[in-house]
Amino acid sequence: MHVLFVEDEVKIANFVRTGLKEQGFVVDYCDNGNEGYVRATENQYDAIVLDIMVPGKDGLTILKSLRLAGNNVPVILLTARNELDDRIVGLNLGADDYLAKPFFVEELVARIHAVVRRTSGDRQNLLCLGPIKLDRIAREVTCNDITVELTTREFNLLEYLMRSPGRVFTRTQILEHVWGYDFNPNTNVVDVCIQRIRKKIDPVEGSSWIESVRGVGYRFRKLES
């Protein structure tokens, strides 16, 4: 799951980023509202965790701008414990949930899953293509009803491809969504990770579920209707 996290308090930011990554999230982080707003408008996220009091555009301004532009990405606001007015304004502007500081990362993770479920529906949280089933919430993959053990990166990459079967993604797109912005674009980790997934989900004989598109990237094979 790809999350944008906007927070200027370094201690909280480091703690939350580490906790989310340990739970398998891909986290894009920025410490000011101006950069956060640009990233929110230029990229597709499963959810945005947004501190109200950040430098530049504040959280409520970002939220209002996104909703006016028709962007309905789930947004969780982080607020000070006593800022009731901000919470009310945020919910009225279209926030999906809020969390008062201090909080436990486990609670934030649970709330992210909840808002994603509400907005996308349970059906989209279970991806089924051919013999492969991927549960985005339980983070489980089965192939012919047999559990497939995947690393966090492998799971995130497979999920990314399965969400848009037939669509070709470049290596750069895959890097940004699965590894994050800070990763070296010249690395071959995408190719290596694809090979590992293929060994786990493909039949011994027959074509691969993840197809290579020469000079471009990869796509998950689209089933013929």
Image: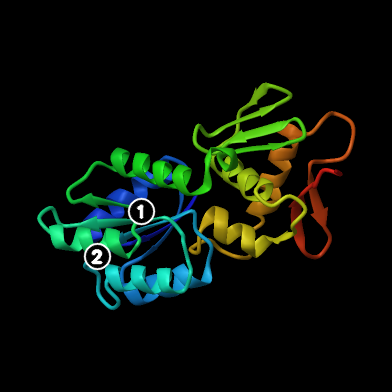
Give the quadrant of the C terminus. Answer: top right
Mark number displayed over residue 193: none
Q: Image point 35% across, 47% down: which residue?
A: 18
Label 2 sits on what residue type? Answer: Ile
Q: First in sequence, mark 1 or 2: give its number.
A: 2
Residue position for label 2? 52
Task: Note whether residue 154 is visible.
Answer: yes
- Percent of width and height locating residue 106: 31, 38
Q: Is residue 51 visible?
A: no
Extreme residue toward the top, this view: 146
Residue at 19%, 63% in the rendered image: 86
For this rendering, which residue is in front, 99 or 84? 84
Local crowd at mark 1 within 10 Å, few (<14), some, or many (≥20)?
A: many
Q: Report how many numbered discs are placed on residues in the image.
A: 2
Question: Residue 80 appears at what percent x and percent y?
Answer: 15, 57
Residues 97 and 21: in front is: 97
For badge 1, the amino acid type reads Asp
Q: Secondary structure at mark 1?
A: loop
Q: Residue furthest left?
A: 82
73 sits left or right of 178 in the view: left
Q: CA distance from mark 1 to mark 2?
A: 14 Å
Residue at image x 30%, y 76%?
57
Drawn side of residue 51 relative to residue 164, left or right: left
**x and y percent of residue 30 in the render?**
36, 67
Q: Secondary structure at mark 2?
A: loop
* Colour setting: rainbow
User: Which numbered mark, 1 or 2, is in the foreground of this view?
Assistant: 1
Would residue 98 appear left or right of 147 to someone viewing this image? Answer: left
Tell me which residue sits at (52%, 72%) in the image. Answer: 42
Neighbourhood count class around disc 2 (C-alpha, 10 Å): few under 14, some 14–19, many 20 upward: many
- Judging by the rendered image, the residue that carries numbered circle 1 is 96
Q: Position of residue 19 (x, y in %)?
A: 35, 44
